[in-house]
Amino acid sequence: MYIDTKNGKKLYLSKKGHAVKGYKKLITDGSHMKKGKLRANIIYRTGEHHYIYETNSKGVIVHAYADDLQLKIHEGRKPHNPKTPDKQEGDHAGHLVADRFGGSGDLDSLVSQAKKVNLKHYKNLEDTWAKAIKEGKKVSVDIKIHYEEGSLRPKSFEVEYEIDGNAYKKLYATRRNLKWRKYLKMYLWRFKQI
């Protein structure tokens, strides 16, 4: 498994998830955050099941990856940090990997999401994953987060996932722009053709 990094290099991971010598270091000791903020241009593990994330030069999450998505170990719901970057009125602090999968409740797994994306579209996707896991299926998830120039609030989420080897793709936009919606419809139509 590998993860593309912004500078064109790739992070190669062994089957046990260790970074292979000569590539970007995978941070596993919690040092990916400094004074409550994510560090820039890093790849790190966080959460109960140590999912992998990557930040860009602005210190915002651009990639989240779970090779083997699992249900949480803890009971109940853990608290989360509501202060995500560039949060707009009506936005939620949305988990990239939900609490029900052991995702972190800190800014190392949270981004600003439109309420509808968080409570409807993304939740439906998480319901699909949880159902598959409960049925004993293997689920892997690869999430790319896209931003507009100068913004720390995601404009879209590109989600590729596999359930028992069957591949799926989804794209969720957070903008309320008609031009963007037209692009989104064309993009989703293209995915249906694959």
Image (tube, rainbow, N blue to C red):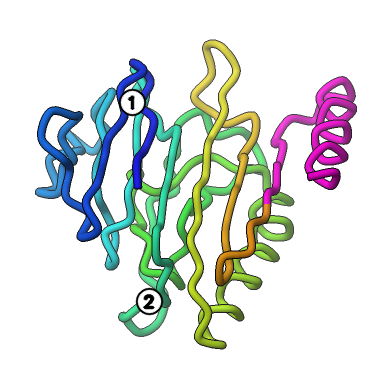
Q: Residue, x 56% and y 65% (percent of image)?
A: 165
Image height check: is 96 above or below 155?
A: below
Task: Name the amino acid, label 2.
Answer: Lys
Q: Residue 128: x, y in percent?
A: 65, 71
96 horizontally vs 30: left or right: right
Residue 88 versus residue 185: which sits nearer the camera? 185
Label annotation for residue 72 = 2
Image height check: is 38 above or below 77?
A: above
Location of mark 1 (residue): 59
Q: Residue, x 50% and y 86% (percent of image)?
A: 136
> Main SS of the magenta segment?
helix
- The outermost residue toward the bottom is 135
Q: Residue, x 68% and y 49% (percent of image)?
A: 169
Magenta span of residues:
169-194
Task: Name the amino acid, label 1.
Answer: Gly
Q: Do the residues labelled 1 and 2 touch (CB within 8 Å)?
A: no
Image height check: is 162 above or below 113?
A: below
Residue 190 belongs to the span the image colors magenta = yes
Question: Where the C terminus falls, by quadrant?
Answer: top right
Is label 1 in a helix, a strand or a loop?
Answer: loop
Label annotation for residue 181 = none
Q: Residue 107: x, y in percent?
A: 35, 44
- The outermost residue toward the top is 150
Residue 126 belongs to the span the image colors magenta = no
Is label 2 in a helix, a strand or a loop?
Answer: loop
Q: How crowded is mark 1: few (under 14 residues within 10 Å), some or many (20 or more)?
A: some
Q: Residue, x 34% and y 17% (percent of image)?
A: 57
Residue 23 versus residue 119: which sits nearer the camera? 23
Q: Residue 164: x, y in percent?
A: 56, 71
20 horizontally vs 83: left or right: left
Q: How far apart are marks 1 and 2 (CA)?
A: 27 Å
